[in-house]
């Protein structure tokens, strides 16, 4: 992953379209998932290294049935305590601070007119939806303080396992780092 980031230009711009496309890929697959994968790949047109990096996932998604995609998603993110998509879990575990973070996220979603629909408010898909609605300073702070540490934890949760979703999460990390950098502590 580091080598790819070195080839990525710094100060890249991530559009709301790209973040929305990632949000659709990182949710439970449904009947529109194949089309959503295509939209996601198209949104990455200006990022050839990223598109190349996500090919294992794209090939898997093109060749697997919806049932197999659902099974992989559940196995990857829902049945594995090392890589759930709730960022507060990675930041705070079951500590009281997570509850405070959930309340802040719920308020942030409400403030920007984002309706919750079955996931906890700290789910990565909600974070990706709210990012383009924040001003640039708040976006950078949110990415650096919350998203990078959580996404790094998700990536670590894959360990040595070969899983097509790893390339998706790694590529998201690369894009966020290219656009918003990292904090000094990371």
Image (cartoon, rainbow, N blue to C red):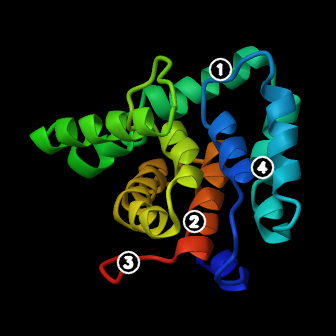
Q: Tell me the CA gap for discs 2 and 3.
A: 12 Å
Label drawn at residue 183: 3
Q: Tell me the CA gap for discs 1 and 3.
A: 35 Å
Residue 41 in sight from this viewpoint:
yes
The residue depicted at 42 percent of the width and 32 percent of the height is: 110
Q: Is residue 71 left or right of residue 108?
A: right
The residue depicted at 44 percent of the width and 50 percent of the height is: 154
Of tags 1 and 3, the one toward the viewer is 3
User: Could you say whether the residue bearing mark 1 is in a helix, strand or loop?
Assistant: helix
The percent position of residue 152, horizontal first and vertical second, equals 43, 60
Please name the residue that numbered disc 2 is placed on: 176
Of tags 1 and 2, the one toward the viewer is 2
Label drawn at residue 70: 1
The percent position of residue 38, horizontal first and vertical second, equals 88, 40
Please name the residue that numbered disc 4 is placed on: 56
The residue depicted at 25 percent of the width and 43 percent of the height is: 101
Tell me: residue 79, above or below residue 45.
above
- Mark 1 or mark 4, which has the lower sequence index? 4
Tell me: residue 67, above or below residue 130.
above
């Amino acid at each position: 992953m580091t080598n790819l980031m070195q080839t990525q230009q710094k100060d890249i711009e991530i559009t709301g379209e790209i973040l929305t496309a990632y949000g659709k890929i990182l949710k439970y697959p449904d009947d529109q998932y194949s089309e959503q994968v295509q939209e996601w790949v198209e949104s990455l047109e200006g990022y050839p290294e990223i598109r190349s990096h996500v090919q294992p996932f794209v090939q898997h998604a093109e060749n697997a049935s919806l049932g197999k995609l659902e099974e992989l998603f559940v196995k990857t993110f829902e049945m594995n305590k090392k890589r759930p998509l709730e960022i507060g879990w990675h930041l705070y575990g079951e500590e009281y601070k997570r509850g405070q973070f959930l309340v802040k996220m719920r308020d942030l979603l409400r403030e920007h007119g984002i309706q919750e629909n079955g996931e906890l408010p700290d789910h990565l898909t909600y974070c990706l939806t709210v990012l383009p609605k924040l001003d640039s300073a708040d976006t950078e702070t949110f990415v650096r303080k919350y998203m990078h540490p959580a996404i790094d934890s998700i990536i670590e949760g894959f360990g040595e396992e070969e899983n097509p979703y790893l390339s998706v999460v790694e590529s998201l990390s690369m894009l966020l780092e290219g656009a918003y950098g990292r904090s000094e502590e990371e």
